[in-house]
Amino acid sequence: MWGKPDALDRFAQGLVGLAALIALGNGLFMLVDPFGWYDWVGTVKATGAANGHFIRDIGLAYLISAALLGYAAGNLPMRWGSALAGAGWLLLHGLLHVWEVAQGLCSPGIFWREAPGTLGPPLIALTGVLFQGLRQRVSSGPLPVRLFLPLADRMIGHLAPNLADFAAAPGHLAEKFAHFMPFTLHRHAASAEQAAMARLGAVMAEDCGPCLEIAARAALRDGVSQDLVQAALERRLPEGPEKLAFDFAQAIALQLLSVDELGEAIEEQYGRAVRTELTVAAATVTVHPAFKRGLGYARSCAVHKFTL
């Protein structure tokens, strides 16, 4: 899971925010001064006489798109679905202009003068979302379940048979699970190594081979060195922040009395936010072995072996 926003995250966020500002400015202009807007946008005169009511209606649509895009820009990895919705109307509006050119209802010259204002904002916003998606720095929450479950199953190496049970359960259980995943994978203040060791420490206390393999391979994807992951699996971590996170998570999972002492040591050295994140990592990663035990997959879990 991604940690603190980096420069490329801010770049994508800025693209969506820029599209929001353009839509906001245009929408306010259309709403406050529809006839002034009509005179200012010279190409619109080719579509017919000004209709103040109709221009204000379109202005309201622009304002709704601006609100959705602005909301998404505040936390694009989690709210990219809102960005798609906000860009959706803008894109359809721009494609209508393309259709008018194709049908001969609008000259190519007018279209190309309009294109920056009609197609520019949605393409800017969609570029930001696509950029985040290609970097795999987006939440699973907005994904349709039929897309999320196969992707999740493939990413974890087909090691979670309980996903099929979630898919078959009534009441949109799989969709709710998709919204839970960003919480359990959260990391911001803690380092990738600390978070990975916390997850490994907690899941090793649960005797679930597939869950341990999932956590180990997730650590590698997050940039944690293979040597460090292997050392954790072999319980030979050297003293330091990684071992402290590992021991703290094990104390949480095994309900050891040392949990308070370890937690206070983490808070003193790295801050309350890191202690909170490692607690969330340790507490939530253990739900996956519980899922498997409750659904009858515990026997196969105990005998599962793997190598990195």
Image: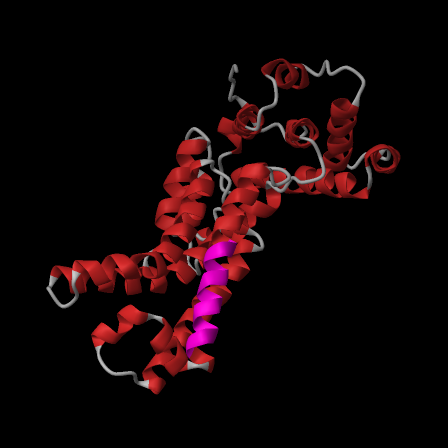
Q: Is residue 176 magenta?
A: no
Which of 268/120 is in front?
A: 120
Residue 162 lies, in percent from the top left, at: 46, 41
Q: Main secondary structure of the magenta part?
A: helix
Please say if 233 is above or below 272.
above
Q: How is the image coloured?
A: secondary structure
Q: Is residue 61 above or below residue 256?
A: below
Residue 222 vertical position relative to residue 108 in the rendered view, above or below: above
Horizontal and vertical percent for residue 289? 57, 36
Left or right of 131 in this view: 202: right
Q: Residue at x 53, y 25 (%)?
A: 217
Is 19 colored magenta in this rendering? yes
Q: Quadrant where the N terminus lies?
A: top right
Query: Which region is colored magenta?
Result: 17-30
Q: Is residue 1 visible?
A: no
Image quadrant in which you'd find residue 65: bottom left
- Determine if residue 46 is in view: yes
Q: Give the residue at x 52% y 21%.
A: 303
Residue at x-position 64% and y-position 31%: 203
Q: Residue furthest left?
A: 104
* Residue that appears at 77% across and 27% down: 247
